[in-house]
Image (cartoon, grey):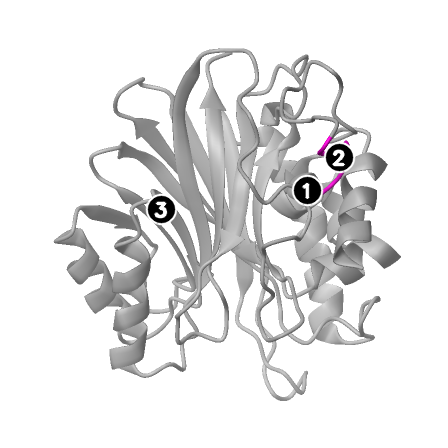
Amino acid sequence: MIRRLAVLVVCGLALAGCSDPADSSTTDDDPAGEPRPRPVAALPGRVVDTLGVASFNVYRHLGRKDAMADALRLTSEDQVDVIGWQETRADYFPEVKQRIERRGWDTWQLWEPDGPFWLAVSWRRDLFSLVDGSWNEAHGGGGPDRTDSPFPPRGWIVVTLRHRESGRLLTVVDTHLNQAIETGDQFQDTLNADYAKEHLRLLADVWDEVPGDLVVGTGDYNFDFRDDFAARPEGGIWDTQHEHANSSYQVLGLDGVEPSRSSRWIDYVFIANQDLRVKAKDAGSGQFVQHQTLDGYESDHRPLLAKIRWYDR
């Protein structure tokens, strides 16, 4: 079933499309549209760098020892260069930042007494320097008097980094949608879901507006990719985002990527459509090379790691 889905994903999108003959990643033994767990071949053009971009929900209720072990494990992965974190409103996360800073990582997080410190972005200091960071609120919070599943104010952070070697800009859009929003293929009839749809509607414009030579996204979207893509509910992820950004799932399929919580692909890495390169003729600066989930973590989410080839255009 997953293999059939990947065929639909890649061939069904006008942007991602089926590979043309100029795409050397497709051979007679690898039909166009089949999932490709091995790395995708390079396309024409000079490569600036190949980046490992990870999305990870740290699970803020995790004990300090396990949470610290997860963070140190992820930042010890040689193939990880940039991380978009979710659920960083935890008393242990300031210590996480201090520990990984000593390992060569810097982090942007807006930490204020009543601020949106649920999100953070970290990067390898020897690869990038910080240009700017900002928080953008999509909606306010909902307490127990309004919903059975309370949520904080939600939105996204935009962190722009300068690639030290080339001077080019990488922008990371990190977000986290409300929980308890999905029925299995549609949105629930709840405040959580109504606010999540507003969140997605606003987020759609961000991909086209933020600065950067390459714009990528990370996040916990709390709506399963397979369900969303099959049903395409109005106001859902595919419905609102596909004209602006594509996820690694849409381009590479699901083979080799294990779900979180046994059955849900809810952790995403995106590339803005204006920067996405899938075919040789595409002018974009970013190509999904490979993606995978990382095992051995105590969080209730699996880190999703996407390798992205960054081209000079």
How many angstroms separate mark 2 from mark 3 (CA)? 28 Å
Amino acid type, callout 2: Glu
Answer with left or right where residue 189 lies relative to residue 130. right
Per the image, the residue denoted by label 3 is: 80
Q: Secondary structure at mark 3?
A: loop
- Could you tell which of marks 1 and 2 lies nearer the N-terminus? 1
Residue 41: percent from left, percent from top: 55, 26
Local crowd size for mark 1, using a 10 Å CA cut-off: few (<14), some (14–19), many (≥20) = some
Residue at screen point 82% across, 35% down: 11
How many angstroms separate mark 1 from mark 2 (CA)? 8 Å
Per the image, the residue denoted by label 1 is: 204
As drawn, which residue projects farthest toward the front?
29
How many angstroms separate mark 1 from mark 3 (CA)? 26 Å
Answer with left or right where residue 196 lies relative to residue 94. right
Secondary structure predominantly adopted by residues drawn in magenta: loop
- Confirm whether residue 234 shows in the render: no
Q: Locate residue 257: give its quadrant.
A: bottom right
Residue at screen point 44% across, 44% down: 53
